[in-house]
Image (tube, rainbow, N blue to C red):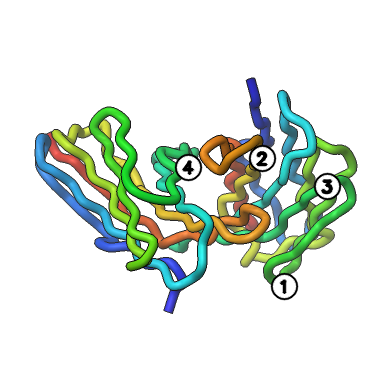
Amino acid sequence: KNEVEQSPQNLTAQEGEFITINCSYSVGISALHWLQQHPGGGIVSLFMLSSGKKKHGRLIATINIQEKHSSLHITASHPRDSAVYICACIRGAQKLVFGQGTRLTINP
Amino acid sequence: SQTIHQWPATLVQPVGSPLSLECTVEGTSNPNLYWYRQAAGRGLQLLFYSVGIGQISSEVPQNLSASRPQDRQFILSSKKLLLSDSGFYLCAWSRITGPLFNYGYTFGSGTRLTVV
């Protein structure tokens, strides 16, 4: 079993739908990243959070440390949101342990 | 501002040939540096990390090695590439500048390596 599990692995939705991607982890962490990887491979950090909730534009990330669970939400989804979203847990020396990623496709 | 440079962007190498990928960071000092790999159809995995010059920690046994000859330079190498070394290699740096919410983590643009 992976230390960091994401669901779903693939998600296809229509433009405008509300999107939720889930991340569960079994390891002790100091914080958690949500990352976005575009088809070319480049990775951008969307959020780093250690408690509660963060919001940036149409993106919202939440984390429940006690339940070892985090979610990434996208409101009013758009085709340009299509990408792979990766949950990554921060361990000692700021090393990242990654989930397998969720491939999101938003159709117009 | 801090930037990270990684090159080359793509590389096709024959089996048995050597490898050298380079990553440099600008705009910060004493960063933690990382090499990650993403094999086809799989998630990212940490290969090496470094907390200072000459200090390298390996996370998984493999055909690769890493070196940090300067504070802001991190090199991934192999003497003889294997087919299984193909993948997408990402360099990254991190630095905690204060409370955890000032934590920075930045990825390079990646190198897509195909061993043929």
Discs 2, 3 touching: Cβ within 8 Å: no
Amino acid residing under circle 1: Pro
Mark number displayed over residue B52: 3
Q: Residues within 10 Å of mark 2 (few under 14, many from 20)?
A: many
Mark number displayed over residue B61: 1
Relative horizontal placement of residue B42, taking residue B96 as reference (left or right): left
- Residue holding disc 2: B95
How far apart marks 3 and 1 lie (CA) works out to 21 Å
Is any atom of residue A11 visible in this view? yes
Give whichever of discs 1 and 2 has the lower sequence position. Answer: 1
- Have a look at marks 1 and 4 and say if they share a chain: no
Question: Residue drawn at (61%, 40%), measured in percent from left and top?
Answer: B10
Observer-nearest of A90 and A80: A90
Element type at marker 4?
A: loop
Quadrant of the drawing holding the C terminus of chain A:
top left
The chain identifier of the residue carrying mark 3 reads: B
The chain identifier of the residue carrying mark 2 reads: B
- Residue holding disc 4: A41
Discs 1, 4 touching: Cβ within 8 Å: no
- Have a look at marks 3 and 1 and say if they share a chain: yes
Q: Residue furthest top?
A: B1
Foreground tag (4 vs 3): 3
Image x and y of residue A105, in percent: 22, 45
Give whichever of discs 3 and 1 has the lower sequence position. Answer: 3
How far apart marks 1 and 2 lie (CA) works out to 26 Å
Give whichever of discs 2 and 3 has the lower sequence position. Answer: 3
Amino acid residing under circle 3: Gly
